Image (cartoon, helix red, strand yellow):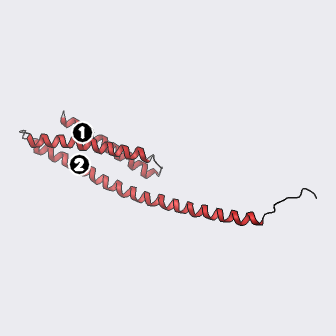
Amino acid sequence: MLQDKLDAAFTRFEQMQNAHFKWVEDGKTPDFKKLVFERNHAFEELKNVLHECFRWIRNSKDKKAPKIAADWRKRLQADLQQEQQLSRKMASYRVFLSDMLKNMHQGKKALTGYGHACSSASPKYVSKKG
């Protein structure tokens, strides 16, 4: 029962990671509040189940307990490696977004500057005669 609970928590965490990898690779701007909520929720669930499992390992008389713990550790290490890769991708995406915002701001300044230059040279009144 506990093993199933942990497998489900690992699976949900990994699904969240995969969805966030896909988001970063597609270059779509997400709902950041939702993204942070999903990450925090998946992490807290996994952390709580892991604590429960390690309490069981410490108190267990089962001879399979060390092997079970080793399997959990391998899966956790794999998830942590994925997390590091995702973190690097998200950091580079943040830099990309920051650069885009800077470019947009510079473009806005340029358009504003041209707008003022053109408005002073344009006629205030247009004659319909002639």
- What amino acid is found at the position of numbered circle 2 in the picture? Leu
Q: In this view, does 81 lie to the left or right of 97?
A: left
Picture coordinates of residue 61 (x, y %)?
A: 5, 39
Q: Is residue 42 left or right of residue 1?
A: right
Q: How many labels does the image show?
A: 2
Q: In this view, does 16 lie to the left or right of 5?
A: right
Q: Quadrant of the N terminus?
A: top left
Picture coordinates of residue 124 (x, y %)?
A: 81, 61
SS under mark 1: helix
Name the residue tied to disc 1: 7
SS under mark 2: helix
Q: Quadrant of the C terminus?
A: bottom right
Q: Which of the numbered marks, if any, corresponds to residue 76?
A: 2
- What amino acid is found at the position of numbered circle 1 in the picture? Asp
Residue that lies at the very extreme toward the top in this rendered image? 1
> For residue 95, which quarter of the picture?
bottom left
Picture coordinates of residue 45 (x, y %)?
A: 27, 41
Residue at x 65% of width, y 62% of height: 112
Residue at x 73% of width, y 64% of height: 118
Other residues around mark 2 within 10 Å, as few (<14) / some (14–19) / many (≥20): some
Picture coordinates of residue 127 (x, y %)?
A: 89, 58
Mark 1 vs 2, N-terminal side: 1
Instruction: Say if 24 sits above or below 38 in the image.
Output: below
Between the C-alphas of marks 1 and 2, the distance is 11 Å
Foreground of the two, 53 or 109: 109
